[in-house]
Every structure is written in structure tokens, then in C-alpha cells.
Image: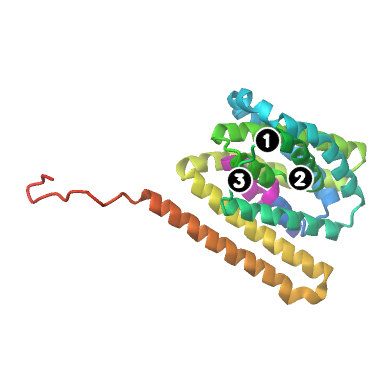
Amino acid sequence: MSVELTTLALITLSAAVVNGGLGHGFSSITVPVALLFYPSRILNPALVLVETVINGYVLVISRRSVPQVWRRVLPIFVGLAPGILAGAWLLSTLDAAWLRFFVFAVLLPLILLQAAGVRRPIRAEGAVGVPYGAGVGVLYSVTTISGPPLALLFNNQGFVKQEFRAALGLIRVAESTLTAIAYLLIGLYSAPSLGLLLAIVPSVLIGIPLGAALVQSLDAETFRRVCMSFDAWVVGFGLSRTLVGLVPASNPAAYGIWIAVVALDAYLLRMFFRRRADHRVPARVGVLQPTADGAA
């Protein structure tokens, strides 16, 4: 295998482990690294085919919660189709370097908002759903990434764990299927795209069950937060590398962006673990100390 395919296999293995544990995260971890080696027009069709299967798996294991969430996500469905068509057209026309810049610039603030634990519940959930779905459709068909914006919305609106997975599975099965059809209609599938599947499929088959088993032995929220930090650092690095390619004179400043992202996420990670520690420390006020004979 070439260096590029080996890197793709390793990053998709890591991404599959995260997806197996959280129910999302495959593309948002894979794409920032893989775009450094492959243009979106070759990478995306391969990822969409894989994600259609992964999303179907997430939906199957969360199917019992579908009746509780399908009405809430219906407006997002309405907006998906036009957004996906617009995004597929952009993918076939935009310059590859600027497309990478767009991916990283949109993805990074969404990840950092999740890391910061921002919560601003939206009362008019149905009214927001259609334009939100259109935006997610554009982002997914251009990048194959939709986990961060959907996770941000569903966490913000108070979806519990199984509802979260079911809602995510419903939306992502629809968007990956529609995007696969759109790619077929505009002729994006090619031999190089299908060749990437040879490196991706084995990683997924190993990583998904491994991640599902791993999250059972770890604190799920800590696992999610550490994965999010890894995602932020990867995306920040991708943004810096892309900016250097677009504006070579920006070399020092561009890598300053990555350093700033790492520093900010490190601070947010520190605050996260501090809050977790505070919640676990038992209250000491009013606790009687045992006497010598063991009585309190």
C-alpha cells in the first residue's frame, strides 16, 4: 500500500472506533486528514457509500426510539433534498483547495461550540428545522460531514442518548442515500473513488465493533470529549495546512491558528475534567467522623 492509502486506512480505523462508540464522527475525523491526500471529488463518493451502511447500522440499533423522535426531525428532512442537490453541484464545480478551506472553516467552530458545552434551546424547533436541514444537506454533500452540526442541535434541544442516536440515524441514512444518488446523477463515481474502498472497508469492519466495546468500559462522556479534542486538533491542523497552500506568505500566521485551536481546546478540556471532578467529590459539610470504637 502507498503512504496515502496506509494513512487513509489508519485514520478511518480511528474514525470507525469513534463512530462505534458515539454513533457519529466517522467523516468529521476522516475527511480533514484524507483531504490532504485526495481531492473531494474522489474521496467523497467512497465515503458516502461506506457511510450509508454505517448510518443504517446506527439506525437499526436505535430503532426503538424512532417513534419518539421522527416528528421532531421531519422538518430537517424537508430541507435536506434541496441542500444536497445544491451541495453536489458545488462539489462538481468548486476549486479543490478552496473547498478544503470551506470544510475546515465551517467544521472547526461547530466542534469548539460542542467542546464548550454551549446550550441555547430553540423554542421554534419546527420552524428552524427546514433551513437547518438545507444547510446540513449542503455541508454533507460537499464534505460528507454532518455529525457536528446535528450533534450540536440535538444536544442543544435536550435529546437523551437513545433519542439522539435514533434522530442522528434517521437524518444520516436519508442524507447519505440522497447524496449517493446525487453523485451518481452528476457522474462523480470513478475507479479511483471505488479503489479507496479497499482501504476503508476493513478499517470500518474492525473499528465499529471495537468502539462499541470500548465505550462500555469507559465513561461515555469522557470518551466523547476526548474524541472531540482529537477532532478539533486534526481540523485545526488541516485548516492551517490548507491556508498555507492558498496563501504561502501566511505560513507562520497559519500555523498560529492551529496553536490557538490546541490551546483553546486544552483549556476547555481542563474545564471539563474540573467540572467532572467537582461532581464526583462528596460533600464534607456535616459529615460525622467515626470515633475510636467505630461509631459515628
**Magenta-drawn stretch contains 26:** yes
Q: Nearer the viewer, residue 3 or 140?
A: 140
User: Which dot marks residue 144?
Assistant: 2
Q: Can residue 190 be seen at all in this image of the molecule? A: no
Indicate whether 95 appears above or below 44.
below
Placement of the C terminus among the 4 image quadrants? top left
| Residue marked by disc 1 | 125
Position of 163 with respect to 277 (left or right) is right
Instruction: Give the mark nearer the N terminus: 1 vs 3.
Output: 3
The amino acid pointed to by label 3 is Arg
In the image, which residues are magenta? Answer: 10-29
Q: Where does residue 152 sit, x and y in percent of width and height?
A: 64, 45
Q: Nearer the viewer, mark 2 or mark 1?
A: 1
CA–CA distance in space, label 3 to label 2: 26 Å
| Residue marked by disc 3 | 120
Dot 1, how many residues are within 10 Å of its Cα: few (below 14), some (14-19), or many (20+)? some
CA–CA distance in space, label 1 to label 3: 12 Å
Give me the residue at 83% from left, 56% from top: 99
Instruction: Give the mark nearer the N terminus: 2 vs 1.
Output: 1
Can you tell which quarter of the image residue 200 is in? top right
